[in-house]
Image: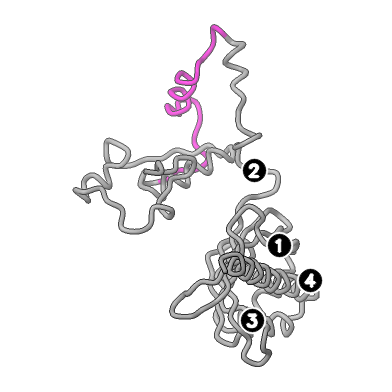
Amino acid sequence: MSAALELSEQSRLASDGALATAWLAAFERALAAHDAGAVARLFQADSHWRDLVAFTWHIRTANGASTLARDLVAFQAGTRAREFRLAPHRAPPRRVRRLGRELIEALFDFVTALGRGSGVLRLVPDDSAPGQVRAWVLHTTLQELAGFEERVGERRPTGEAYSRNFGGENWLDQRRRLAAYAEREPAVLVVGGGQAGLGVAARLGQLGVDTLVVDKHPRIGDNWRTRYHSLALHNGIKSNHLPYLPFPPT
């Protein structure tokens, strides 16, 4: 019995993945053809698209199939989004319940004219076509600009300069000199060293953008210490990690 249940679960997961893959392929074809009607037919009437910079260069929401299809096609002329596919190293499509609705939730990747993006797709059954699905929610985010990738992983600094330059600056000397801003001005000034300010500055720093953070408090984190005695998080840990500095698993 357990083996049969496991096989059934595998079949369902494969079916969910096939439905999400087919939807992404149809979506890409409709965008490439700049066919707003074809895009709209992939969404249910009461649907929503949330974009973070990928298509619109803003944080923008469109509601309703005809409205979001019109906007997607209009922005596609410059965005040239393509290569939509399920994210290979993230959770596969799965059945979940969101706002009281049973649906398939899929994570995907894509490419634009200027960079690489990711997204979330929520599919619901198509009442007019049994066995088919339409999109209820689409979320698109630009993750990085091509040619300006973060200096992480294989692109991280090697430290070779320190190992050869015995009489020169070490890492701490360099940090102090850079933080002094004695001979230059920053390219970006971040006002406020809270979680958002620190996150933005960290990301910009790994993109090679000279960024200075200023805050009225004497220590990093004082905006929490002086406001919350408990220093407790109010929501899930996964949404509160700092870039490059995740909370420990405990």
Q: Amino acid at mark 3?
A: Arg
Of 145 and 97, nearer the camera is: 97
Query: Is residue 12 placed above or below 194 in the rendered structure?
Result: below
Whichever of labels 1 and 2 marks the residue nearer the N terminus, that label is 1
Whichever of labels 3 and 2 marks the residue nearer the N terminus, that label is 3
Please identify the quadrant where the N terminus is shown: bottom right
Whichever of labels 4 and 3 marks the residue nearer the N terminus, that label is 4
Please identify, in this view, whether the residue under mark 4 or under mark 1 is nearer the observer.
1
Which residue sits at x=68%, y=53%?
Answer: 115
Q: Amino acid at mark 2?
A: Glu
Of 219 and 98, nearer the camera is: 98
Q: Give the residue number, with chain letter if any, for mark 4.
A: 32
Whichever of labels 1 and 3 marks the residue nearer the N terminus, that label is 1
Q: Give the residue number, with chain letter if any, for mark 3.
A: 134
Whichever of labels 4 and 1 marks the residue nearer the N terminus, that label is 4
Compute the Cα span from label 1 to label 2: 21 Å
Position in image of residue 72 (x %, y %): 66, 74
**Magenta-highlighted residues:** 166-190
Label of residue 126 in the image: none
Compute the Cα span from label 4 to label 1: 15 Å
Of 198 and 44, nearer the camera is: 44
Please identify, in this view, whether the residue under mark 4 or under mark 3 is nearer the observer.
3
> Magenta stretch: residue 178 in it?
yes
> Magenta stretch: residue 189 in it?
yes
Q: Please, which residue is most extreme toward the front here?
A: 1
Q: Give the residue number, with chain letter if any, for mark 2.
A: 149
Compute the Cα span from label 4 to label 3: 19 Å
Which residue sits at x=33%, y=42%?
Answer: 215
Please identify, in this view, whether the residue under mark 3 or under mark 2 is nearer the observer.
3
Q: Amino acid at mark 1?
A: Arg
